[in-house]
């Protein structure tokens, strides 16, 4: 009996939506060879060529365009069936990690959508540094995590980028001191060595006055002690003063945020996929309102 392989359909959709085999492979946590083999065997089974490779990328054939519409409908129906069969009350929550400086904006959205007792899937949020979240993902303690990308390793699915700003409390002028007092996150923070590197490269003297493991601690230190800190633009409080090159400080590089999936058997769980899709959907809305 002939039937359509839903895993092959998911791979086909990913190749089309992401614009290529390599990107789709990264998204699906497979090798490019495995994705290519899946598509080739799927085409052989159907007796139709679905995708043509060109110098500019991939192009769907007429058969591929026809199948794509049905593929989306089949995958949607499959998700609905799995959701209907799932026992909402005993389901394991989807465990989502995110850094402290994005907790308020993203957790509010996620909890509003998935926070109800009878809502499927249930969500458990873990707040920590990106480096720790990546370790938890590798250990299987998280299903998804919003992380700050390392400059040397591009991981996960891109969510957004934003600038970082030097900032301090109104009424204080730490930039005028001989050595600038800094309030920073602990050494687990991925941005900390980059901040210090940029200051050293610009030959700006500095000393660390305060260290905190969470954003409220850093903000309190800046407000009470007149120290300088560096934060993502969306995390800078409205009552803070933003500083830059005119104040003798180096320009900070933008940061990239990504959504990373755990490489586990739960990666394809319908609840995990639903939460991941929601985060991708709300990310631009959240950042636009920041």
Image (cartoon, rainbow, N blue to C red):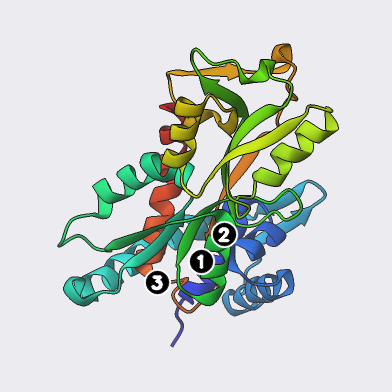
- First reached walking from the N terminus: tag 3 or tag 1: 1
Quick check: 152 above or below 284?
below
Instruction: Calculate the distance from the C-alpha at mark 2 to the C-alpha at mark 1.
Output: 6 Å
Left or right: where does residue 57 sit relative to residue 222?
right
- Which residue in the structure is indicated by mark 2? 14
Q: Is residue 247 left or right of residue 73?
A: right
The residue positioned 53% from the left and 76% from the top of the image is: 139
Which mark identifies residue 269?
3
Q: Secondary structure at mark 3?
A: loop
Q: Residue at x 42, y 53 (%)?
A: 277
Closest to the observer: 218 or 136? 218
The single residue placed furthest to the bottom in the displayed view is 1
N-terminal of the two: label 2 or label 3?
2
Spot occupied by residue 155 in the image (x, y as percentages of width and height)? 65, 57
Q: Which residue is mark 1?
A: 10
The quarter holding residue 88 reads bottom left
Distance (Cα) linking label 3 and label 1:
13 Å
């Amino acid at each position: 009996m002939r039937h359509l392989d839903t895993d092959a359909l998911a791979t086909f959709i990913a190749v089309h939506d992401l614009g290529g085999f390599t990107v789709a492979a990264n998204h699906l946590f497979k090798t490019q060879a495995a994705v290519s083999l899946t598509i080739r065997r799927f085409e052989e089974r159907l007796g139709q060529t679905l995708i043509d490779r060109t110098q500019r990328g991939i192009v769907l054939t007429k058969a591929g365009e026809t199948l794509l519409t049905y593929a989306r409908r089949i995958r949607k129906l499959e998700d609905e069936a799995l959701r209907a069969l799932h026992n909402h009350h005993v389901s394991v929550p989807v465990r989502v990690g995110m850094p402290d400086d994005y907790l308020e904006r993203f957790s509010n959205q996620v909890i509003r959508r998935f926070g109800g007792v009878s809502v499927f899937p249930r969500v458990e949020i873990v707040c920590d540094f990106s480096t720790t979240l990546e370790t938890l993902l590798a250990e299987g303690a998280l299903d998804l995590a919003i992380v700050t990308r390392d400059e040397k390793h591009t991981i996960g699915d891109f969510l957004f980028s934003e600038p970082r700003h030097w900032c301090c409390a109104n009424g204080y002028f730490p930039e005028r001191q001989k050595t600038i007092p800094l309030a920073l996150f602990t050494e687990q923070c991925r941005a900390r060595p980059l901040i210090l590197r940029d200051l050293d490269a610009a030959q700006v003297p500095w000393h660390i006055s305060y260290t905190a493991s969470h954003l409220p601690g850093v903000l309190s230190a800046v407000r009470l002690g007149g120290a300088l800190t560096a934060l993502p633009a969306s995390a800078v409080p409205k009552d803070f003063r933003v500083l830059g090159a005119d104040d003798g400080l180096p320009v900070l590089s933008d940061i990239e945020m990504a959504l990373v999936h755990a490489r586990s058997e739960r990666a394809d769980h319908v609840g995990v996929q639903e939460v991941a899709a929601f985060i991708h959907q709300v990310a631009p809305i959240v950042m636009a309102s920041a």
